[in-house]
Image: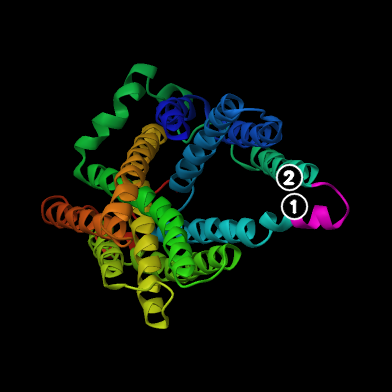
Amino acid sequence: WNEVTLLLVFPLFGILSDRLGRRQLYALGLGVMGLAYVLYPMATDIADLTLYRVIYAVGIGAATAMLGTIVADYPQEKSRGKLVATVGTLNGLGILVVVLGLSHLPELFVAMGTDEFAAGRYTHMVIAALCLVTAVIVATGLKKGTPVSRENRPSLWELAWAGFGEGRNPRVALSYAAGFIARSDLVLVGTFTVLWGTTAAVTQGFDEVVAVKKGAMLLGMVQGAALIWMGVMGWMLDRMNRVTGMVVAMGLTGIGFLSMWLVDDPLAPEARILFMMLGIGQASAFMGATTLLGQEAPLAKRGVVVGMFNIMGACGIFFSTWVGGRLFDAVKPAAPFALIGALSLLVMIFAIVVRIKSPGPKGSEIKSGVGGMH
């Protein structure tokens, strides 16, 4: 239900952002997310929880769409890769704060004397408050309106078809294809790395609590490598043709994910370097796709193009979780990763073709600041 809702709202929010502006939709999305966190503990059955999940998906759809659009709007072309790296790093650190910090709030509240149910509700309220505070910061801190004047804004009809129409630009089409990989590999890593580590630990005789911690540590290793690599990749992308950057990024993604096929025991010390390569591959896909999209999305239709990019990402999540889960059970735990690795190499081949036929700005032009909002 979450992904179905995202597929429906991404194009709507893309159109609205190009007609009305970014900041009010961003603030609205964060506010709706906060509302969903308030409602979650009140669910009494699956129907309630599904409804609240849909509300949450509307909020996260608006926030995700506007974050991607703003990251495309704000940087100068010569520093686009570095800004994408900064945002990606902060996003990763946010995940670690949730996993290592906020997830322990229920234990803290119980230790302070509250019952378990109340502790869960208080934790949700804290996260809701963080959403609302961020909404206020966004509503007051971001620039008003859209990047183009009112008379130059496309009509609703033009915007409705812009996501498909801009795909005729081969570099935009390449970013869409890379978006399918970038979103799917993020969810794949978050889901199946922990599952793989946990099941391996249980098989080796660890109790369930310790097993889950070992799975989480494995994910932390992947994310740590990804966070470090983002800065390196951002620096590289600001010094080369961005389609060349996509070739490099998808090649690294393919290598990182296919390397999981060599892992027999994910908890073995010799597997650590391969999981670090997995993190590098995950970060590379995100960096390459987001930077190229920001360069190529036209100013007046940027929200819609980012919306289409997010739709491709949602389709990637559908595909990777549905097919990947079956491969995990039927073949071996490394199989979902190998699937995404193989698809990444196909996108790399597409990038090579685009590099030959429609390369876009040279690295020297990017370094000198050609293009961009400023």
Residue 368 in sight in this render: no
Q: What element carries label 1?
A: helix
Residue 18 located left or right of residue 248: right
- Above or below: residue 334 compared with residue 140: below
Residue 194 drawn in magenta: no
Q: Where is residue 115 in the image (x, y as percent from the top left)?
A: 82, 46
Residue 207 located left or right of residue 231: right
User: Which residue sits furthest right?
Assistant: 113
Q: In the figure, residue 279 lies in which quadrant?
A: bottom left
How is the model colour-coded? rainbow
Magenta-highlighted residues: 106-115
Instruction: Name the residue: 71% across, 58% down.
Output: 104
Which residue is label 2 attached to? 120
Which is nearer the N-term, disc 2 or disc 1? Answer: 1
Q: Position of residue 150 (x, y in %)?
A: 47, 24
Residue 264 located left or right of residue 79: left
Q: Where is residue 277 in the image (x, y as percent from the top left)?
A: 35, 72
Q: Which mark is residue 106?
A: 1
| Label 2 close to label 1 by CB (< 8 Å) | yes
- Above or below: residue 69 compared with residue 208: above
Instruction: Name the residue: 34% across, 49% down.
Output: 325
